[in-house]
Amino acid sequence: MDNKLVNSTKQSFQKQFGEDPDSIFMSPGRINIIGEHVDYNNGFVLPASIDKYICFAIKKLSDSEIGEFYAVDLNDHFTVNVNDDLKPVLQNWANYLIGVIDGIKKQEKKIGGFKVAFSSDIPMGAGLSSSAALECGFAFALNSIYQLGIDRKTITLIGQASEHNFAGVKCGIMDQFASVFGKKEKVIKLDCNTLEYNYYDAKLGDYCLVLFDSCVKHTLLTSGYNDRRNEVERGINIIKRNFSEVKDYRDVTHDMLEHLKADLGEIIFKRCRFVIEEIKRVGEAAIALQNQKFKKLGELLIETHKGLSEDYEVSCEELDFLVDETLKEEGVCGARMMGGGFGGCSINLMKKSVSANVIATIQKKYKEKFGIDIKVYKVNISEGTHQYDENQKISFNQSEHPHRRYNPLLDEWILVSPQRAKRPWKGQQETINEVKRPRHDKSCYLCSGNTRVNGDKNPDYKGVFVFKNDFPALLNKDVIFQQKDQDDLFKMKPERGINRVICFSDDHSLTLPEMKIEDIEKVITVWQEEYKTLGAIDYINHVQIFENKGNLMGCSNPHPHCQIWSQSSIPTQVSKTQENMKKYYNKNGRTLLQDYLKKEIEKSERIVLENKSFVALVPYWAVWPYETMIISKRNIRNILEFSEEEKKLFATILKDLTTRYDNLFKTSFPYSAGIHQAPTDGEEHTEWHFHMHFYPPLLRSATVKKYMVGYEMLGEPQRDITPEQSAEILRKLPSVHYKIKADH
């Protein structure tokens, strides 16, 4: 429930009328899962109310006969005498409400005056039936405050009559019925002939419904709709004349249609075929939803769109494009156009974990194709028209509600705001500069045989090459330091260390995911050697191995390489990690990551890759959109403890993970990555557990990155897409590098 909508409507009432409302009522929009164009063919539909509402703030005036309306969103008002002989007025929005009063009076029910303000978050013109919500919500409110005793079915008929007689729209009954009878996580199988109905469970779990508004309305909308009605009416009349047992389309079989194909003609035959197949699909879809068979439901949606596009011919280029492109995306089960046709929305069933990525992709493609920014609505099946209880509490959902997550390694919290993933991106975008690099670049100071900036010449190396950093952050000099003028507020101490650069390969064109596993093993061997050699130096207490990849990470040279900074102090992040690992180990007798990894494997929802010795996952507390960790399954303290098999499996998972990174946005994926392992200070460090962090900045595409700014610098880190969603996206990516696929 949108408390923001309730609060703003109440405030508008107070401002307009100078007093508080007595009651708040909510009336929702609706979607139709399946069952398009069968309502006027005496078929079945499968609608549901959604979490987009019109909110009514109302006050009863028993001793008055004057009703005062205030349309908040239009900043317009209207006054009516409820005892007058009511007729349509020029203010069209008011007609939907005046017609309700007229309908109540025709039920021989008496009401007095009222004051009402209403506001909506139902998108106008998107085919979500805001008009039905307006009529039925107001009728429900008057029925409640005046205790008229009108049942819900009659309320839907009052709403429909208002739209027919006062707004001048000859609508069916489905919209009003869904708005009034809707239930949370339920769809309604409605018999459009008898108005009999049944509820079916619609617990979507890890799936969600997303609407893409094409933002087009073609001129065929009215004429095409009328043509279809005439065509199917002619069709059923022909069928009835030949088959006396047929009363309506529910009784028609494919055999009957085939028998009458010549009499019907090609066009009417196709129209009739769609209707009988769609009626059948409604029942199948209800059962699929009930049993959470989302693949089956998706198949039915796809069939419906094919029928609407090819047989009923009420789709359009824009809707067909939306459906076709959406179905190409991983994690999408089904899609179809929704509503009367010739424009409007598509309804799409997909996994929650991929929704942010799918939305961004479709927005981009649609803009490129038609020059139009589509509108996107992520909807939940929610409660129908009801009185709002201001004391009600909403059940927490980690995929929808803001929350904080704890990082036990750093003893820090992160704010997760999944609802923000719906917002369109208008921020910084970088230019992609993906140039095919040569195997050897004469201008690159890291290539074999070339001269570096300091004048030293690289040997004609093959494979891995290590050298002392020409511009080190740390110096291998022991200086005399005298402490003076220092107190608790002004502290410093000298820092001594050795910085080295490791070129992964003599091939300038490669990156880690493009290297062979055996060549990555050779890099790991050098990491082991450097950790051992540097760590053995008496003053070196920590050896940090890390890679900055890509211009976005400040890497000035694309040649495949990493760095080692070894130093006399244990740096802050490592020190904090060690302190928290030690506390956990002393308390539990096991490493923190040993227990954490066991629970992650059990849950599996954040696992990206797994082999015999290592797991790659998106941490529960991840800050960066596609941040990952590689954790050893065995309790390994440092890289020297790898067996030969573990070395190979570590190389394998490194290649597989970085390949998935590149495949995510079809670009050489930038990141900062580094190994965290036991310090080299001579302590045993039984609390340590080997792991490697990857911190990539990309957010929505190859050109959109996350920044740590504002609240994140002043408060705490924050992310939008949940770690579970990120893991699902990475997990579904192919393991073959996109460049290899492109070459073939």
Image (tube, rainbow, N blue to C red):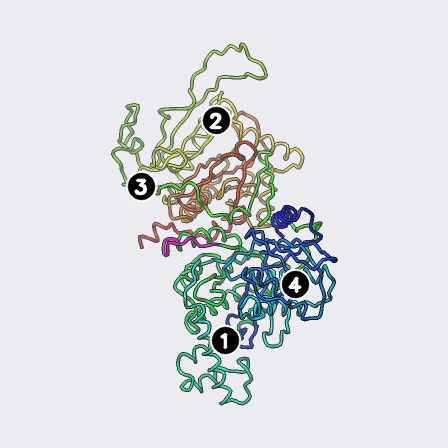
Distance of mark 2 from mark 3, alpha carbons? 32 Å
Distance of mark 2 from mark 1, alpha carbons? 73 Å
Q: Is residue 418 left or right of residue 141?
A: left
Quadrant, the C terminus: bottom left
- Whether 740 is drawn above or below 571: the answer is below
- The quarter of the picture where residue 342 lies is bottom left
Mark 1 or mark 3: whose residue is earlier in sequence = 1
Is there CB contact under 8 Å for labels 2 and 1? no
Distance of mark 1 from mark 4, alpha carbons? 36 Å
Q: Which of label 1 and label 3 is nearer to you?
A: 1
Q: Position of residue 331 (x, y in %)?
A: 48, 57
Q: Position of residue 178 (x, y in %)?
A: 60, 65
Crowding at mark 3 (Cα within 10 Å: few <14, some 14-19, many 20+): some
Q: In this orientation, which residue lies closer to the viewer: 166 or 322?
A: 166
Crowding at mark 2 (Cα within 10 Å: few <14, some 14-19, many 20+): many
Residue type at mark 1: give it: Glu
Residue identifier under label 4: 139
Q: Which of label 2 and label 3 is nearer to you?
A: 3
Magenta segment range?
Answer: 367-375
Residue type at mark 3: give it: Ser
Q: Is residue 415 left or right of residue 459?
A: right
In the rendered structure, find residue 509 and report the number of the disc placed on it: 3
Q: Tell me which residue sits at (52%, 67%) in the image.
A: 296
Distance of mark 4 from mark 2, alpha carbons? 78 Å
Is there CB contact under 8 Å for labels 1 and 4? no
Q: Is residue 619 magenta?
A: no
Residue identifier under label 2: 535
Mark 4 or mark 2: whose residue is earlier in sequence = 4
In the rendered structure, find residue 88 and report the number of the disc placed on it: none
Q: Is residue 604 left or right of residue 662?
A: right
Mark 1 or mark 4: whose residue is earlier in sequence = 4
Residue identifier under label 1: 277
